Amino acid sequence: MEMGSYLREIEGKLSNDPIFTEKISGGGGGGGGGMRRVWVPGPVIVGAGPSGLAAAACLKQRGVPSMLLERSNCIASLWQLKTYDRLRLHLPKQFCELPFMGFPGDFPTYPSKQQFVKYLEDYAERFDIRPRFNEMVAEAEYDRNLGFWRVRSKRGGCRGDETEYVCRWLIVATGENAEAVVPEFDGMTEFGGSIKHTSLYKSGEEFRGKKVLVVGCGNSGMEVCLDLCEHSASPSLVVRDTVHVLPREMLGRSTFGLSMWLLKWFPIRLVDGFLLMVSRLMLGDTARFGLDRPIMGPLRLKNMSGKTPVLDVGTLAKIKTGHIKIRPSIKRLKRQAVEFVDGRIERFDSIILATGYRSNVPSWLKEGEMFGKKDGLPRRPFPNGWKGENGLYAVGFTKRGLLGASMDAKRIAEDIERCWKAEAKLSTPTTLSPPST
């Protein structure tokens, strides 16, 4: 349906569809039970993390209102509720800024978790972004008869308080890290000790004096091992695959910043070769310590698969001294012990799963073209995965962090603004306020 025609036809649709009639007549009010139905003039954004905030701010800068739905009780819930205490941005702050607002000048190069959350809260306040919290989106589907999206949410997860938002545009901002990935191992019920995902890990203090097995050698797994060492625990790290470990800084500059600068002048193959040469000089041969490197270079691997290299913040030194031990894949768990694929059986008090996160889009978005059913990511690779059909958009799925999310947000706002302005020339719609909280 063309943008210009939908407003001209809306009066007819209102008279024929109970959703719109109910809202306009006031029949869908906020009483208990039943479903409240709301017409949203601008886009509905699902997810109030950094990506959702960036999309809302970019839209507001272009004069387009939006409604932001968030399942938790705060913005950036992954950062606030599911990250460990010592976490810092892995990249320098200038590469993590959201559109139209930089970090405070007194923030360090790598802001802490608390500083980054403060930045996001200030960002929301500056652009007057007011998400509707505790809104769990259960289902979103495009109604081809109406030419609109129907987004059904449950307030606080309660079935008795449901709202259906009807909108022309839907922006998916739930991101690549919506749900924790928790692998199954034989004997998990037999183990007896604590098994927790890093989303539940806060500090190594609770593991002081204990022998802990960390599964997963990405940035989180490496940093949790370092944190455990600093709290007098004895960590071992399961390395199931090859991994690129790079120093966080080289030649007096951040490795990421240096890489971006070199890519302006040289092909990615040469930049990868340079990074690996300098890394070997600074860190040594990581394969000697059980950390084999992939055949493909770190930047090319990131572009091809989205797999991020580990930026070392001190963990490798602990591996070299034996304070962190490297172990192969797990075969099965036993009572307070782990059997590895090489036949070794070793006692552990606890297991921490640094096994990452995944998208939850397939569980609630009812469409089969833009997002993959298995991984919940846009089918089209970067930089073309931000726009789908029928007013569907994605922000924060580029596997390029906050920089990629900001790029998406700007493109989306520009695209929607064109439709918004074209529509405004044809008609002045009746604006219906969202339901009060």
Image (cartoon, helix red, strand yellow):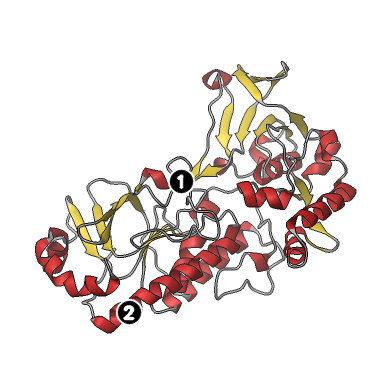
Residue 268 sits in quarter: bottom right
Left or right: 108 in relation to 84: right
Q: Name, please, the residue furthest toward the bottom.
A: 425
Residue 270 sits in quarter: bottom right
Task: From this view, report whether residue 105 is shown above or below residue 280.
Answer: below
Q: What amino acid does circle 2 point to?
A: Ala
Label 1 sits on residue = 376
Q: Quadrant of the N terminus?
A: bottom left
Q: Earlier in the sequence, mark 2 or mark 1?
A: 1
Residue 82 on image: x %, y %? 54, 47
Residue 206 on image: x %, y %? 64, 37
Q: Residues within 10 Å of mark 1 (few under 14, many from 20)?
A: some
Q: Residue at x 55, y 76 (%)?
A: 100
Left or right: 366 in relation to 56: left
Q: Is residue 414 visible?
A: yes
Describe the element under mark 1 as helix, strand or loop: loop
Q: Residue at x 56, y 34 (%)?
A: 196
Q: Residue at x 82, y 36 (%)?
A: 287
Q: Quadrant of the C terminus?
A: bottom left
Looking at the rendered structure, the number of numbered marks drawn on it comes to: 2
Residue 282 on image: x %, y %? 88, 50
* Label 2 close to label 1 by CB (< 8 Å): no
Q: Residues within 10 Å of mark 2 (few under 14, many from 20)?
A: few
Q: Is residue 248 visible?
A: no
Which of the two marks, 2 or 1, is nearer to us in this view? Answer: 2
Between 207 and 56, the residue placed more toward the observer is 56
Q: What amino acid does circle 1 point to?
A: Gly
The dot on residue 422 is 2
- Distance in Å between CA atoms under marks 2 and 1: 32 Å
